[in-house]
Image (cartoon, helix red, strand yellow):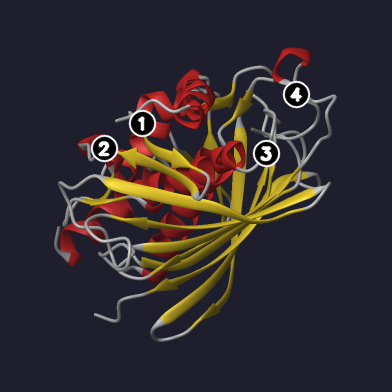
Amino acid sequence: MNRQAFNALLSEAHTRNDYSALIDLVPYARLIGIECLRLGDDMVFRLPAQADNIGNPVLPALHGGVIAGFMEHAALLHLLMFMGSAHLPKTIDFSVDYLRAGHYRDTFAQCQVWRQGRRVANVAITAWQTTQTEPIATARAHFKVDES
Amino acid sequence: MNKNPLVQRAERFLSALRHCQVLGMQVEAADKKGLTLRLPYSEKIVGNPETGGIHGGAITTLMDTTCGISTVCFLPDFEVCPTLDLRIDYMHPADPHKDVYGFAECYRVTPTVIFTRGVAYQDDPAQPIAHAVGTFMRLGSGAHIKSGFPEGKA
């Protein structure tokens, strides 16, 4: 997709507050079922409870890899939306700390771009289920962003 | 593939993880040196539609699972070990239409914590797509699968 077509898609999504077209571009995001909500100037990402995302069958709890994948993709979408680049940033590294069990229920994530350089962006991601002040996981990642 | 007891234990562990079944992950090898799992390439785990490359989330899931299950190669009995933290460093993007293998070993086992490390690769383990380091918690002998999981994830 070229930049113009992407920007049209993005502004359409912003206007309608419906980001499904943007999410549908990436098969993995569809697989785990990521959603995106705009609350004022904030973007909040949602991962609805879905049985196929379960790792621990006994609790039951979401697979830690799904929680991490959700957080990584939230950061990618966050950068896309605020950079206006038509290309997905590339992940350089990704580090996640698991703080609480990710139960079989909806999960939310929010991102904070701590530094956006010309080539590299540093993003912190927080994921929670009950309340944002009790995160189930925090992560930080570096992304290679494209200048064009 | 020879079905040694470690492979069987790893397969039993993996088969209980629904999301890993959705991704079609399989045990490739398991011995005293570590565990290798295979993540088959499929369109549904693509992260970059322009190149067909696999999403980092699927690689993270592969490495979280490989590091977590590699504990069966180093512990005498089955234990549930929730992930404390996991770090993935990407060396280069994965080639599309190729399976990804995850290898992991435990390089330090203490009574409370297990330190694991591994690589994700396609053709050559010496040319990995990604390096991974993960720390796992030991919940003690009371935390067996039959008695349910205490706080923490598998």
Cβ–Cβ under 8 Å for marks 2 and 1: yes
Q: Contact (CB < 8 A) between labels 3 and 4?
A: no
| A121 on left or right of A25 | right
The disc placed on residue B68 is: none
Q: Do labels 2 and 3 touch, CB within 8 Å?
A: no
Tag of residue B26: 1
Of pointers 2 and 1, the one earlier in the residue sequence: 1
Residue carrying label 2: B40
Q: Which residue is mark 3?
A: B75
Does label 1 or label 3 sit earlier along the sequence?
1
The chain holding disc 3 is B
Q: Give the SS element for disc 1.
A: strand
In the displayed structure, B29 sits above or below A86; it is above
Residue placed most toward the observer, A83 or A13: A83
Q: Pointer 4: what residue?
A: B149
Q: Position of residue B40 (x, y in %)?
A: 26, 37
Is residue A78 or residue A53 the one in the foreground? Answer: A53
Earlier in the chain: of badge 1 and badge 4, it is 1
Pinpoint residue A7: horizontal percent, then vertical percent. 26, 61
Local packing at callout 4 (Cα closer than 10 Å; few below 14, some 14-19, many 20+) is many
Which amino acid does the dot numbered 1 rest on? Gln
